[in-house]
Image: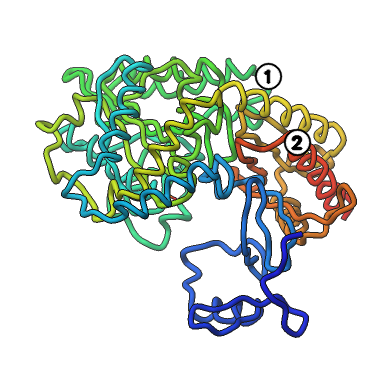
Amino acid sequence: MHKPIRWRDGQAVRRGESGHELSEAQLLALEDKYCSHGDTVHYTIPPKIFDSCEGSFLFDAAGREYLDLQMWYSAVNFGYRNARLDAAVRRQLDRLPQLASQYLHREKIELAAQIAQDAEQKFGAKGRVHFNVGGSQAVEDSLKLVRNFKKGKSLMFAFEGGYHGRTLGASAITSSYRYRRRYGHFGDRAQFLPFPYHFRGPKGMSKEEYGHHCVKQFERLFESEYNGVWDPKAGEAEYAAFYVEPVQGTGGYVIPPKNFFVDLKRVLDQHGILLVVDEIQMGFYRTGKLWSIEHFGVKPDVIVFGKAITNGLNPLAGLWAREELISPTVFPPGSTHSTFSANPMGTAIALEAMKMMRETDYEAMVAEKGAYLLDGLRDLQRRHKIVGDVDGLGLALRMEICEPHDSFTPSKAIVDRMVDEALKGDLDADGKKYGLVLDIGGYYKNVVTLAPSLHITKHEMDLALKLLDRVLQRVGQA
Ligand SMILES: Cc1ncc(COP(=O)(O)O)c(C=O)c1O
């Protein structure tokens, strides 16, 4: 165990900003009173306070180890306190940590060049990179870019189960009405189409057939002007772009069939609709490729990225777009920017992360670790009736929790209990007590979405499977 900071009256205590020592109970009381609860989700009551981190683990103030299988919703792909990336922070901190975004610094330029050169090599298209701070803001920027290029067309297609962020524009193309319900409409809500979620698709269709079926349903919209999206006389669609996550993130790590995006892109190309790929959660080798869309053999018009590009350190997000959409004549200086976009700390870390990704064979490493974990999950599925489905692409893995009588009816209640049990920190393995950090997603909020560190060791993977087994046993018996 890590050493607690200090103990007082049997409680771990930490030093507050003003020099006062606050117990955990005091901190929680202050949080309850002074923190907006609107900027977080309290999955457990009381919410958990963590104190430190290393590699694949978070530690509470008592020093208990929690194996993290969600890594800050996939923002910390390269492990907590990654020495190489942390060193980049220190170097930048000592040289040029702050700079107004109207001036240039080498890290911004080199990072943009690397991303654009990589995309040119992979997708055969010249392009540019535009930075912002968070994922939702980068999605907002992509909406402006697309609307500008499509001469003000503001309608978008997106998928049921898709998630693109919580700002007003991003939530308009995110499928959950819950995220919009209390705020009215600020922009146009996307038209949401079914994603090939095979486990819950029609019976009797293979995964490939179901993917094909979903595209056919979409293609039907263009059959006649009366289907509502296409003017055959003008040869023009009312919609500007289709926003996709190649593997759905918040939607429950749903992996489409291999042929799906090739089929979909054919329909988009025929009707002049852009393909915007949201790689915010699945990018940076989460699935074993820099961009998850690389698994599916299509060329995107725009890629939006964020999260793991800085391994969860100084925030940075952005987009890559084909030159036609983003050249300075089309998208001139000042089209949309923010004080902290392309900040020196974020770009320095991201540049080092990109170098690390080039120098390390993440593709082979992630595929191998992902296959090992998926095998383990399949074994858990065989032994626990509440595990209805498991699947994975690289280290983006899913475990869908269902009622035991049919291993199909979604059970949010069981998954909620799993999260609680996992966070108690009292799971036995190898003669020690551990906690487990899990994240929940899915259309029915019944999917454990597993996004471990890409640097997870074999020993840690075995530990993860053991701890998941313990949790499944506890909630399965209850
Ligand atoms: C696919 C996807 N798009 C967009 C976002 C929004 O990014 P942020 O939370 O950084 O605003 C997220 C965040 O989880 C995401 O997973």
Apparent side of residue 298 relative to residue 423 in the rendered image (left or right) = left
Apparent side of residue 28 relative to residue 466 in the rendered image (left or right) = left
User: Tag 1: Cα neighbours inside 10 Å, few (<14), some, or many (≥20)?
Assistant: few
Q: What residue appears at the point 9 percent right and 31 percent down from the top-left corner? A: 329
Relative height, residue 24 to residue 9 (above, below): above
Whole-percent x and y of residue 51? 62, 64
Whole-percent x and y of residue 378? 78, 29
Q: Which mark is residue 88?
A: none
Q: Residues under labels 1 and 2: Cα distance?
A: 17 Å
Whole-percent x and y of residue 429? 86, 48
Apparent side of residue 197 relative to residue 282 in the rendered image (left or right) = right
Q: Could you tell me which secondary element the residue under label 2 belongs to?
A: strand
User: Tag 2: Cα neighbours inside 10 Å, few (<14), some, or many (≥20)?
Assistant: many
Relative height, residue 450 to residue 207 (above, below): below
Ligand 1 under 8 Å from disc 1 Cβ: no
Per the image, the residue denoted by label 2 is: 388
Give the residue furthest to the left.
Answer: 329
Type of amino acid at the residue the image marks with label 1 = Gly
Relative height, residue 318 to residue 263 (above, below): below
Q: Nearer the viewer, residue 471 or 232?
A: 471
The first of marks 1 and 2 along the sequence is 1
| Observer able to see residue 47 | yes
Quarter of the image where the C terminus is located: bottom right
Q: Could you tell me which secondary element the residue under label 1 belongs to?
A: loop
Per the image, the residue denoted by label 1 is: 204
Q: What residue appears at the point 83 percent right and 56 percent down from the top-left corner? A: 433
Quadrant in the rendering for residue 13 = bottom right
Q: Nearer the viewer, residue 156 or 392?
A: 392
Type of amino acid at the residue the image marks with label 2 = Gly
Q: What residue appears at the point 32 percent right and 30 percent down from the top-left corner? A: 302
- Circles 1 and 2, Cβ within 8 Å, touching? The answer is no
